[in-house]
Image: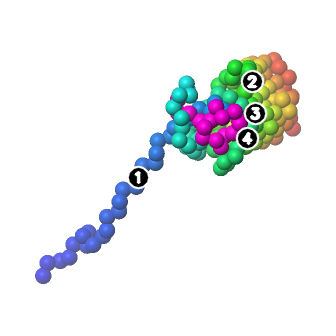
C-alpha cells in the first residue's frame, strides 16, 4: 500500500488581498459647508478637477486647501494632514477633531482653531495653534502657540513663540517669547 501524502489533505489558503493603495486627497470646501464628512469637498488632484469617491481613510494623506470646521461623518482620521498655505482669504482653519497618525503640517497663515488634533504637528510661516494637540509640536519661522494646549513636548525655533500650555518639555531655540514650563 502506498503511504498517504498528508500535504494533499491540507486545504490551500487563498492569498490575502493587498490593501488598497493609500490616496492623497484634497479638501477645497466646494460644497461651502466646511464639512470633512462631505465627499463633495474632496478631490483626488490638487487642481480639484477629479472628484473623490470617499473621504480620507486612516491610511490616506489629507491636504486642506480651505477651512474645515465641521465633520458630519465618521471620526476624521488620516495618515498625514497638511494645510500648506492659506486659501485666497489669507487664512485656513482646522476646527474639528482629527487623528493624523503620522502628524500634521501647518503653513502660511493656517491655524488649528479649536480643534482636537491627535498626532504630532509642525507649524511654520505664520501658522498658529489654539486648540488641543496630543503629541509633540515644533514651531518654526513666526508660528506660535496662541493659548493652545500641547499634551507632549514642544520645540520653538526661529522667531516662534509659546503663549500656551505645554505639558512636556519645552525647548526654546527662538528669539520670540518662550518660557520653559515646569
The span from disc 3 to disc 1 (Cα, nearest Å) is 37 Å
Mark positioned earlier in the residue sequence (3 or 2): 2
Name the N-terminal-most of marks 1 and 2. Answer: 1
Rounded to the nearest angstrom, the CA distance separating label 4 from label 3 is 13 Å
Mark nearer the viewer, 1 or 4: 4
Outermost residue to the left = 1
Quadrant for residue 105, please give it.
Answer: top right
Q: Tell me the mark number nearer the camera, choosing from 1 and 2.
A: 2
Mark with earlier residue (3, 1): 1
180 to the left or right of 4:
right
Coordinates of residue 128 in the picture (x, y in percent): 77, 27
Residue 100: x, y in percent? 64, 40
- 87 vs 113: above or below: above
Q: Which residue is mark 2?
A: 91
Q: Which residue is disc 3 drawn over?
A: 112
SS at mark 3? loop
The residue drawn where x is 70% and y is 43% is: 71
Q: Which residue is mark 1?
A: 17
What is the spatial separation of the Cα atoms under label 3 and label 2, in whole angstroms?
11 Å
User: How packed is label 4: few (under 14 Cα within 10 Å), some, or many (20 or more)?
Assistant: some
On the question of residue 108 being in view, the answer is no
Label 2 or label 4, whichever comes before in sequence order? 4
Amino acid at each position: 500500500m502506498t503511504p498517504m501524502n498528508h500535504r494533499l489533505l491540507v486545504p490551500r489558503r487563498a492569498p490575502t488581498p493587498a490593501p488598497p493603495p493609500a490616496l492623497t486627497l484634497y479638501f477645497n470646501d466646494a460644497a461651502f459647508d466646511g464639512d470633512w464628512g462631505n465627499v463633495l469637498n474632496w478631490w483626488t488632484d490638487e487642481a480639484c478637477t477629479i472628484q473623490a469617491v470617499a473621504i480620507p481613510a486612516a491610511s490616506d494623506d489629507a491636504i486642506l486647501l480651505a477651512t474645515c470646521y465641521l465633520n458630519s461623518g465618521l471620526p476624521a482620521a488620516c495618515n498625514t494632514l497638511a494645510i500648506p498655505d492659506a486659501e485666497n482669504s489669507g487664512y485656513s482653519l482646522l476646527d474639528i477633531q482629527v487623528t493624523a497618525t503620522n502628524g500634521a503640517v501647518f503653513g502660511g497663515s493656517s491655524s488649528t482653531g479649536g480643534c482636537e488634533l491627535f498626532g504630532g504637528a509642525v507649524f511654520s510661516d505664520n501658522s498658529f495653534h489654539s486648540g488641543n494637540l496630543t503629541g509633540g509640536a515644533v514651531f518654526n519661522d513666526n508660528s506660535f502657540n496662541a493659548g493652545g494646549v500641547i499634551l507632549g513636548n514642544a520645540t520653538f525655533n526661529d522667531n516662534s513663540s509659546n503663549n500656551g500650555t505645554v505639558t512636556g518639555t519645552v525647548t526654546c531655540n527662538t528669539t520670540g517669547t518662550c518660557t520653559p514650563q515646569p
